[in-house]
Amino acid sequence: MPVLVMKFGGTSVATLDRIKRAAKRVGVEVAKGYDVIVIVSAMSGKTNELVGWVNETSPMYDAREYDAIVSSGENVTAGLMALTLQEMDVPARSWQGWQVPVKTTSAHAAARIEEIPNDNIMGSFGNGMRVAVVAGFQGVSPEGRITTLGRGGSDTTAVAFAAAFDAERCDIYTDVDGIYTTDPRVCKKARKLDRIAFEEMLELASLGAKVLQTRSVELAMRYKVKLRVLSSFEEQSDEAGTLVCAEEEIMESNVVAGVAFSRDEAKMTLISVADRPGIAALIFTALSDAGVNVDMIVQNISEEGRTDMTFSCPTDQVARAEAAMAEAKTTGTINFAELIADTEVAKVSVVGIGMRSHTGVAAKMFQVMSAEGINLKVITTSEIKISVLIDRKYMELAVQALHDAFELDKAA
Ligand code: ASP
Ligand code: MG
């Protein structure tokens, strides 16, 4: 029988009533003839509560015990979901990560899945079981300890199971009804997309559209797992939600698929750095060692052997970046005049695989900004994305103007 993976996020299993609702959807797919693997998150708020308990008990906690505690929320929902399905006369059994087993690395709190042997669960399907309810977010290390995959990790569990079981599709049930052209809270005209390419979703996911864990999209792209994002609060239909898929499966799409933004960015400029081989390596090694996530980098024109180097990072990492640069200056590793931090900026990006074959997207984006009188502070591009740093107070305006100009409210 074909296998379907259905993942229910925290809000979709937040109460016993909602678990019942989710179980009914599972029942519908079982009735269609699927063997179903259900991946569950912890009830919403539960993981945060568990993390809080860990921090309160031991500020310098042992990561192995963190994982033992924080993974427990999913165990509860897995058991409750299996019981609910049994009450509906659907043969179901719960599985914790170690029972499958979901084999991971031993990087506690940030483990990566290495292998999911499918014989145990396949064997249970062969014996009349119709649903395997698997606790998401967790696995087992080579040392035999429980591991977790990082926050939001159940999405990655779901995609990994879909790949390991060659599932027909991986349905991600959440509290939004799909992927939008931009955040509807910022732009009222935002439109739900029927389909989006893996590459586009990756850009949108890492730019702050928090619907799917980025790693889950990378994994889906690698194994060509069809991912559908849909709401568990609305009526089910085969067309519901957004399908994240290979670009070959999208017939016609807009040149620009979406406008992403990230509000809390800072623009950092090192003034008058010696322009010599190895200087960028020194600066960005020091920043990386300090745990600063650098995004955009621009090296300016140099005069008399000195240049300005600009980079962007999240605002909450500015202090760390400043400390790292100050230390490098004191020890004499990096010589510069001053470090200027502009913490009132935001990043706005347009994303679309159509950019590979269409010219003029950058020109149009810049014209739109110019017409609104918005100054561009840094510009970077990739094959399918153009990003600009602008004053934060213009962020909403920029998103709305770009959404209008690229006519994202209309389907291709
Ligand atoms: N419950 C975990 C978290 O909140 C994993 C997940 O729900 O994806 O991060
Ligand atoms: Mg999530």
Image: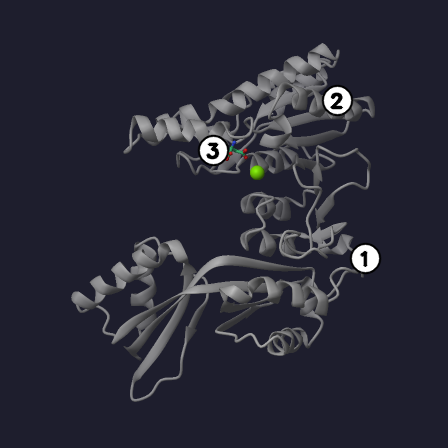
Residue 148 at x, y percent in the picture: 46, 32
Q: Residue type at mark 1? A: Met
The residue singled out by tag 1 in the image is 251
The residue singled out by tag 3 in the image is 104
Residue 200 at x, y percent in the picture: 64, 56
Quadrant showing the C terminus: bottom right
Name the residue at 35% across, 59% down.
Answer: 318
Q: Whereabouts is ligand 2, in terms of quadrant? A: top right
Are discs 2 and 1 less than 8 Å apart at CB? Answer: no
Name the residue at 37% across, 26% down.
Answer: 53
380 vs 195: above or below: below
Name the residue at 50% across, 68% down.
Answer: 389
Residue 348 at x, y percent in the picture: 56, 64
User: How many dots with numbers?
Assistant: 3
87 vs 195: above or below: above
User: Which image quadrant is residue 339 in?
Assistant: bottom left
Would you say 151 lies left or right of 169 here? Answer: left
Q: Residue type at mark 3? A: Thr
Name the residue at 70% across, 19% down.
Answer: 125
CA gap between label 2 and label 1 equals 33 Å
Describe the element under mark 2 as helix, strand or loop: helix
The residue singled out by tag 2 in the image is 24
Dot 1 beta carbon under 8 Å from ligand 2: no
CA gap between label 2 and label 3 equals 32 Å
CA gap between label 3 and label 1 equals 37 Å
Describe the element under mark 3 as helix, strand or loop: strand
Q: Which of marks 2 and 1 is nearer the N terminus?
A: 2
Q: Can residue 376 be seen in this view?
A: yes
Residue 1 at x, y percent in the picture: 78, 25
